[in-house]
Image (cartoon, helix red, strand yellow):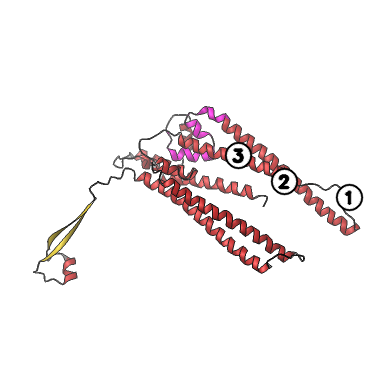
């Protein structure tokens, strides 16, 4: 339980690293070009097919060459602040590194303080039991106290460091040099960092309440089911380990409810993840299809026609004689 926050933090960092790799691998420079008829040279194609080039990346930070948005995002995930260097927002660097250092350092101090107090209490509890067993008396020393306030403060500071890190990534993508048409890479990264932002970038504002509604409903059921799961889990543990348990329900009943709410909680996690992934895919697809031209004259028309005997399908389906013609109906679709 005490390492839950650290576990969540590591999962978020790994997720950002994976998303950075995916965004770079999928949205190379040739995808950013809105004109599919432009043919790139062999050298250019070779450059864009690279997974990641540190030489080109640091050359871009020195403003000797340009960096596409996928490379910039991938680099800023590993090295926070490099996106601001590429965007020439140098004045933001002291706030980024100062905020990250202060929050992470102070948070680590308070979490270590909590861990030390918990360790001291555990040692005291062990020694007290050993003393009671041997001498039949209570341990004579002062009882240490677990510093839960230090845990709360450290956790909040670490969350603050995570928010600064996330804001650094979002700021770098938002301030990337603008383009006339939506870029699939940018729309995707927007949606990865903040659900619905890719749809706003694509100009599809009506989709934002749909996806946010889905996320909020899924998160509500996730929270409710997890709370009930913990509740019945504790009741079951107390009923099976304590001889003085006198709760309103039996241990078996609590176990049944625990399993039910755990299953519902897992379903809610899957639903939340699906909505999140769907809005990322939606942002990418509709940004990529932004220039897809569809004529306003979408119509379907019918006209009579003569089906000749050399039409193999007609001969097979109607058993026509090779020397016969047939009258049929032709369907045309214009779009």
Is disc 3 placed on a helix, strand or loop?
helix
Q: Earlier in the sequence, mark 1 or mark 2?
A: 1
CA neighbours of label 1 inside 10 A, class few (<14), some (14 to 19), many (20+): few
Kindly identify which numbered label has been placed on residue 148: 2
What percent of the width, then of the height, locates residue 26?
42, 46
Magenta span: predominant SS is: helix
Helix, strand or loop status at disc 2: helix
Rounded to the nearest angstrom, the CA distance separating label 1 from label 2 is: 24 Å
Crowding around mark 3 (Cα neighbors within 10 Å: few <14, some 14 to 19, many 20+) is: some
Q: Residue at x 60, y 36 (%)?
A: 100
Q: Disc 3 marks which residue?
A: 160
Label 2: how many Cα within 10 Å (few below 14, some 14–19, many 20+): some
Label 1, on which residue? Answer: 140
Spatial distance from mark 2 to mark 3, Cα to Cα? 18 Å
Q: Where is residue 110 shown, x and y percent of the image?
A: 70, 41
The answer to whether residue 118 is left or right of residue 29 is right
Instruction: Give yes or no for residue 290 being in the magenta stretch.
Output: no
Please state the extent of the stretch shown in magenta in the rendering.
66-94
């Amino acid at each position: 339980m005490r390492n839950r926050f650290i576990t969540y933090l590591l999962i978020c960092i790994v997720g950002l690293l994976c998303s950075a790799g995916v965004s770079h691998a999928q949205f190379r420079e040739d995808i950013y070009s809105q004109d599919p008829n432009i043919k790139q040279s062999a050298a250019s194609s070779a450059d864009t097919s690279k997974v990641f080039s540190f030489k080109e990346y640091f050359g871009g930070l020195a403003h000797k060459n340009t960096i596409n948005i996928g490379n910039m995002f991938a680099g800023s995930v590993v090295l926070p602040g490099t996106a601001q260097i590429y965007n020439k927002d140098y004045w933001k660097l002291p706030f980024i590194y100062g905020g990250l250092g202060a929050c992470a350092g102070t948070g680590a101090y308070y979490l270590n303080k909590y861990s030390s107090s918990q360790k001291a209490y555990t040692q005291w509890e062990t020694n007290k039991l050993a003393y009671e067993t041997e001498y039949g008396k209570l341990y004579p020393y002062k009882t240490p106290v677990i510093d839960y306030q230090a845990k709360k403060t450290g956790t909040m500071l670490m969350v603050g460091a995570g928010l600064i890190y996330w804001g650094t990534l979002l700021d770098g993508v938002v301030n990337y040099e603008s383009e006339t048409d939506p870029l699939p890479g940018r729309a995707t990264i927007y949606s990865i960092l903040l659900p619905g932002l890719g749809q706003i970038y694509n100009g599809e504002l009506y989709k934002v309440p749909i996806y946010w509604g889905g996320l909020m409903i899924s998160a509500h059921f996730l929270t409710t089911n997890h709370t009930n799961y913990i509740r019945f889990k504790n009741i079951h543990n107390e009923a099976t380990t304590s001889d003085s348990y006198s709760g309103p329900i039996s241990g078996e009943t609590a176990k049944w409810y625990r399993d039910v709410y755990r299953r519902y909680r897992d379903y809610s996690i899957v639903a939340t993840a699906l909505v999140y992934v769907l809005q990322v895919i939606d942002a990418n697809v509709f940004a990529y299809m932004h220039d897809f031209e569809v004529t306003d004259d979408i119509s379907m028309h019918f006209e009579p026609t003569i089906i000749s005997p050399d039409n193999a399908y007609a001969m097979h389906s109607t058993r026509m004689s090779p020397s016969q013609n047939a009258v049929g109906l032709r369907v045309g679709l214009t779009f």
